[in-house]
Image (cartoon, rainbow, N blue to C red):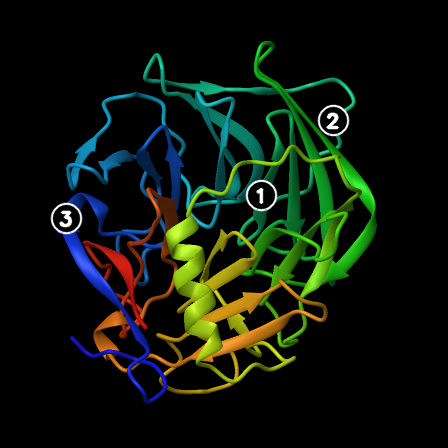
Amino acid sequence: MALAGPPGGAGWTWRPVARDALLARAFHSCTELRGRFYLVGGLPAGGATEPSGDTVVFDPAAGQAVQMGARGGPRRSHHDAVPVGGRWLCVVGGWDGARRLATVAALDTERGVWEAWSAAPGSRPPAGLSGHTCTRISDRELRVAGREGGTRTQRRYGSIYTLRLDPGARTYCYKEEGCHTTSRSGHCAALLRTPGPHPAHQLLLFGGCNSPEPEVAGHWSPGKIKEEPPAALHLMEQLARLVSTGQGSQQGPRGLRHHSCSVVGPFAVLFGGETLTRARDTICNDLYIYDTRKSPSTWFHFPGADHGLKRVGHRTCLWNDQLYLVGGFGEDGRTPSPQVCILDLFI
């Protein structure tokens, strides 16, 4: 197992902890809810155009995956999913094999059934979404960012929508925000606190276009977003020690898409993806850490040494002070990984 990082003993790798053919997919969603990872949809192989309609539940404590028997699951890829109310898994938008959608499907994890929620009166949905992001602001409010359009027409800029949910009524309502972003697809989004004594929150978009600059897709003043207790104190401490060994930069990765992103305290941890800056060898295995503890925020780049860890269309999930890597296509951009790995840091 190749370690990566600067000389002097600091490094990182993804350590395999489970393997199951049920997990082999890419461009799926993987969402932690009550200590389980819910994998929905995705593509079974490179070149496939028909997404899967299955739902697989992975138990990280036991290291086991099972296929859910719930019928009516959404056939989706390039979608996003968020946990709501500690009970529902809401799948937003994506590609169904024929068109881009903006609908919301919800898995009621208590009853083990899929529900098709309906648009509330006054909802103004996007024309269609794929390769977008959907970020939970609260149990009733999500923020959707991406380039909307059908298969033939795509806007030349990115749109931002507030998506309001009413779990009791099983309805949702889109409202387009007045601001636009750069046209992005396959980007990631991170809801991060701003530094300082009165922390506000901002939603930053990374990648999905040629620009290396993050873009603000929402700002919330102090107290507007309910503070969650820190979920991964040991991992935060390890990341702080890792970046202390690296050389910081104001510039992030240029032209990266279909990478993963997880927020760990003041850090956004990005991994893998596909670069738009090279004609060959486009699948990446680099770790990027965006450190917001001081202003201006700083990027740290830790290149990967193990070609077997190249991934695109994968997901990372935070649970029990560990960062998990699930699925994605490997170096050839076609073969899905059946592995689950944990990020190991050596400081």
The reply to whether dot 3 and dot 1 touch (C-beta < 8 Å) is no
Q: Quadrant of the N terminus?
A: bottom left
Asked if residue 149 can be seen in this view, the reply is: no
Mark 2, mark 3: which one is toward the viewer? 3
In this view, the residue in front, 253 or 10, is 10
Q: Residue at x 59, y 42 (%)?
A: 135
Of all residues, the one furthest to the front in this rendering is 197
Q: CA distance from mark 1 to mark 2?
A: 17 Å
Q: Secondary structure at mark 2?
A: loop
Question: Which residue is the site of mark 1?
Answer: 134
Give left or right: position of 66 versus 50.
left
Q: Image quadrant of residue 337?
A: bottom left
Q: Judge by depth and name the residue closer to the eye, 309 or 323.
A: 323
Please state which of residues 263 and 114 is positioned toward the viewer in this rendering.
263
Looking at the rendered structure, the kind of residue marked 2 is Ser
What is the spatial separation of the Cα atoms under label 2 and label 3, in whole angstroms? 39 Å
Q: Earlier in the sequence, mark 1 or mark 2?
A: 2
Numbered tag placed on residue 123 in the rendering? 2
